Amino acid sequence: MKKLAVLVLLVLAGAEGTPSATLYDQSIAQVLGKQFSSPALSYLVINVQTGTRVAARWENLGQPVPAGSMVKPFTALAYGEAHGYRYPAFACRGTADGCWLPRGHGRIGMSEAIGYSCNAYFRKLAAEVSRQDVEQISFRFGFQDRFALPFPLSLVGLRGGPQIPPEQIVRAFVRLTDQSGEPGVRELLKGMALSARAGTASAIQQSLPGAPVLAKTGTAPCVHNPRAPGDGYTIILYPADSPRLALLVRVHGVPGARAAGVGGEILRTLITGE
Ligand SMILES: [Zn+2]
């Protein structure tokens, strides 16, 4: 517990850009490098307060990757901006509605749709989102122009969703948490908390039971050679109230829900230093 407190202080010290933060970043990057060396794994860790990279293990960080369902909170805001930030409730009947969960999610609102990454909900929502709404959101969150293709399925995260460089994904989520007081954002962060607690990112609980975490998963076409059916992604922000760390993880050949488990392990190492 004592060690944890010291490390948390070091992370906090990072906000002032003190030398200890650099030492912390360097040593934690080494610890991560040793413990998470699988070639199937890519990760990027950002210190939210300084905006600096804490650690990165990612081949070609400038190359856009398919964001998959990680796009859903931004699709939600694009809808919200044009609809007075009132999010609808939709019924998901599963396979019949094009959702990944065969039996369906039932009637749900926005927070559940994000927490459980419901495709049926977002198919219905995306049908009411215009390209102009998407352009505004892209600008607000620093996405480049490939955000919307293919439209509107990309807004659901299907067919890989939009192509976005990893660092842009992380920084967009940091911006989203920064804007927690803006209209329509609270429901989305609530959905990301639900995702980490009981939804598609709940494998985080295995490493960090009860930890205050925001998360969103994505499963997208594999970008590796040899090809797997898909790659799993998870974005994690910690702690939920005022994130200090943002972590994007990608695991080759597994769904996003499994990548969340690896993300939890990495976050535990970042928090405990071991
Ligand atoms: Zn569903």
Image: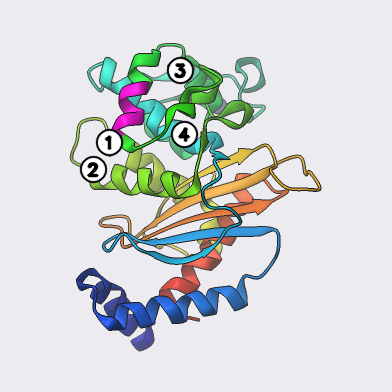
Alpha-carbon span between mark 4 and mark 1:
14 Å
Residue 32 drawn in magenta: no
Question: Which residue lies at the image location 54% right of the left edge and 74% below the top edge?
Answer: 32
Residue 139 drawn in magenta: yes
Give the percent coordinates (x, y) of residue 2: 34, 88
Q: Quadrant of residue 50?
A: bottom left
Along the line of sight, the residue nearer the viewer: 210 or 238: 238
Q: Are marks 2 and 3 in contact (CB under 8 Å)?
A: no
Image: 188 above or below 201: above
Q: Which mark is residue 126?
A: 3
Along the line of sight, the residue nearer the viewer: 261 or 89: 261
Image: 46 above or below 67: below
Q: Are marks 1 and 2 in contact (CB under 8 Å)?
A: yes
Tell whether 28 sits left or right of 159.
Answer: left
Alpha-carbon span between mark 2 and mark 4:
17 Å
Q: Which residue is mark 2?
A: 180
- Amino acid type, residue under disc 4 in the picture: Val
Secondary structure of the residue carrying numbered label 2? loop
Q: Quadrant of residue 98?
A: top right
Q: Which residue is mark 1?
A: 185
Can the viewer see residue 128 in this picture?
Answer: yes
- Amino acid type, residue under disc 1 in the picture: Val
Label 3 environment density (alpha carbons within 10 Å; few <14, some 14–19, many ≥20): many
Q: Which residues are drawn in magenta?
A: 135-140
Q: Quadrant of ligand 1?
A: top right
